[in-house]
Amino acid sequence: MHDIEPWFGWRDEYAAERDSKSPFYGRTYDEFKFTSQIYNYYIHPQWDFFGSETLYCKILYVDYKRKFALIELIGEWNDCIGNDIMFLKRDLADVFLKKDINRFVLLCDNVLNYHGDDDSYYEEWYDDVKDENGWICLVNTFDHILDEMKKFRLHYYLNFGPEYNDINWRVKKPAYIVDEIENIINNRQKSLL
């Protein structure tokens, strides 16, 4: 896991450590010293700790005018033991919600497992964004994680599923990714009418 780096393709346009509104503002990184671990596996030093012992993140891009954030995740999403959603909601989402961000893209290519528990933080986060026509979307989530999330009825609060797993986000600009997700969400809502 130590050689899996967060996506760096938009670093010229945005870096969380240079964004005074980011929870990671002012953070410095040592490219040669590996200190963070998920269980007994070291991870690349560019990943950011936000409170969870098993799930790390990288804020890849935030657009305050268009009100969206793209956040890449790595590790094991464990609500059952570590209450990871609490950290994700309180230490990341709430910071951006105060800055009027209402659309969150969670890039889950490197999330290897999910262990569910209570859905109250998901419901709270959903309630925070829905009145502003916002949403939370998981992109490129493994099938076994989707199955587990469905068991805990998270599809009531999050957008996820096969239609969001075909998004090749690394070759697109952030705004195009958000537009593509919004088109999927809107088409899905129209089909339910």
Image (cartoon, rainbow, N blue to C red):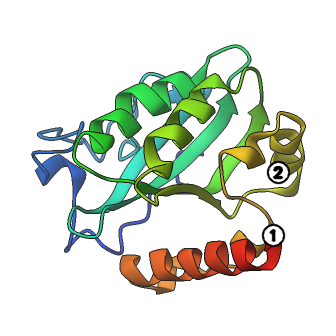
Look at the picture and state if 47 lies above or below 6: above
Percent from the top left, x then y, of residue 61? 32, 63
Image mark for residue 146: 2
* Residue under the point 63% across and 52% down: 110
- Which residue position holds label 1? 162
- Taking 113 as reference, is 18 left or right? left
Percent from the top left, x then y, of residue 7? 43, 65
Q: 1 or 119, which is in the foreground?
A: 119
Look at the picture and state if 187 lies above or below 92: below
Q: Secondary structure at mark 1?
A: helix
Could you tell me if the residues under marks 1 and 2 are in contact, i.e. CB atoms within 8 Å? Answer: yes
Quarter occupied by residue 154: top right
Residue 130 shows in the view: yes
Q: 2 or 118, which is in the foreground?
A: 118
Percent from the top left, x then y, of residue 139? 63, 63
Percent from the top left, x then y, of residue 26? 11, 39
Quarter occupied by residue 13: bottom left
Q: Amino acid at mark 1?
A: Pro
Q: Distance from label 1 to label 2 (Cα)?
A: 9 Å
Quarter occupied by residue 122: top right
- Taking 15 as reference, is 103 left or right? right
Image mark for residue 60: none
Q: 166 or 35, which is in the foreground?
A: 166
Residue 38 shows in the view: no
* Residue under the point 72% across and 79% down: 190
How busy is the neighbourhood of tag 1: few (under 14 within 10 Å), some, or many (20 plus)? Answer: few
